[in-house]
């Protein structure tokens, strides 16, 4: 599955800590007004600043949420009316069966083709059905195979993702990586008796996504032999993210004694 590469590094936020909080009410000097992505790390620029630097990683996956099944009905007769009647009779049966099974009309597309073949007439119809419930899909396909003759061909289901699924998965991976880094920073500060402060820098250092499994090249040689579950796994997409975060570190807050 070919997916578009994402940027290798993206800075989401950077807040430069102040050495003196009273300076927030005054105008920022030209040296201090640096663009996002620039952080002086020398002690003279921010005397007394204490930071904790942590990294976090996460990997998420998503199974395909839609499947497409194509049903083809054809007939070749010497009389055109007989060819049309044969196809339309079975086509009506298919569409009625889909309605009875709860398939919405907007998820069904029907196309018809009528042409002359040598000294006969050939009529062919194609029904494309989009499913979001894979259990219902299998039940309907099994039903049609049982009720219709060999002139009706039902294609194996094709699994895919709705538009925007990859980008949504990338965001989920990034948020999960940020949460993992935050938990790590919390535990580190608690271990050394400090309090975790505000984030100073959140940077996504690496992001990648891919589809299918590592052994898909072995399965692709015999696509007709794949089971439904194997096809779902092959169409599953994965996304991973690695972030780097710098947090401000505060001392343990002392409880005030009330008189």
Image (cartoon, grey):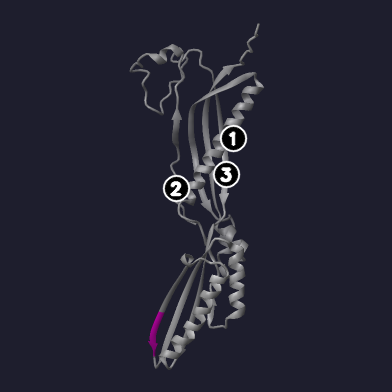
Residue at (45, 81) in percent of width and height: 124
Q: Secondary structure at mark 3?
A: strand
**Along the viewing direction, whichever of 255 and 29 lies nearer the viewer:** 255
Give the percent coordinates (x, y) of residue 84: 44, 86
Cα distance, mark 1 to mark 2?
24 Å
Cα distance, mark 3 to mark 2?
16 Å
Q: Is residue 223 above or below residue 5?
A: below
Residue annotated with mark 1? 180
Residue annotated with mark 2? 5
Q: Secondary structure at mark 2?
A: loop
* Most frequent secondary structure within the magenta stretch: strand
Q: Quadrant of the C terminus?
A: top right
Q: Is residue 139 above or below residue 236?
A: below
Mark 3 or mark 1, which is nearer the start of the sequence? 3
Give the percent coordinates (x, y) of residue 130: 50, 65
Image marks 1 and 2: residues in contact by CB distance under 8 Å: no
The disc at residue 59 is 3
Dot 1 crowding, Cα within 10 Å, few <14, some 14–19, many 20+:
some
Mark 2 or mark 1, which is nearer the start of the sequence? 2
Give the percent coordinates (x, y) of residue 47: 48, 12
Q: Secondary structure at mark 1?
A: helix
Q: State the extent of the magenta-drawn residues as a range.
A: 113-117
Q: Nearer the viewer, mark 3 or mark 2?
A: 3
Q: Nearer the viewer, mark 1 or mark 2?
A: 1
Cα distance, mark 1 to mark 3?
11 Å
């Amino acid at each position: 599955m070919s997916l578009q590469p994402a940027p290798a590094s993206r800075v989401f936020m950077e807040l430069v800590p102040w050495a003196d909080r009273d300076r927030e009410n005054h105008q920022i000097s030209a040296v201090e007004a640096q663009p996002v992505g620039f952080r002086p790390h020398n002690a003279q620029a921010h005397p007394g600043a204490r930071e904790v630097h942590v990294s976090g990683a996460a990997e998420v996956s998503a199974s395909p949420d839609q499947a497409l099944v194509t049903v083809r009905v054809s007939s070749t007769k010497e009389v055109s009316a007989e060819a049309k009647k044969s196809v339309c009779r079975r086509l009506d049966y298919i569409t009625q069966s889909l309605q009875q099974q709860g398939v919405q009309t907007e998820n069904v597309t029907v196309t018809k083709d009528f042409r002359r073949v040598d000294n006969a007439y050939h009529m062919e119809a194609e029904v494309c059905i989009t499913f979001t419930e894979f259990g219902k899909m299998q039940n309907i396909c099994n039903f049609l195979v049982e009720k219709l003759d060999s002139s009706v061909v039902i294609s194996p289901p094709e699994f895919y993702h709705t538009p925007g699924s990859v980008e949504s998965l990338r965001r989920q991976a990034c948020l999960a990586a940020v949460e993992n880094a935050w938990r790590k920073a919390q535990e580190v500060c608690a271990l050394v008796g400090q309090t975790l402060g505000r984030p100073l820098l959140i940077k996504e250092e690496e992001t990648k996504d891919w589809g299918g499994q590592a052994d898909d090249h072995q399965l692709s040689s015999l696509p007709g032999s794949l089971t439904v579950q194997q096809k779902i796994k092959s169409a599953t997409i994965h996304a991973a993210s690695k972030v780097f975060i710098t947090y401000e570190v505060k001392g343990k807050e002392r409880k005030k004694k009330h008189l």
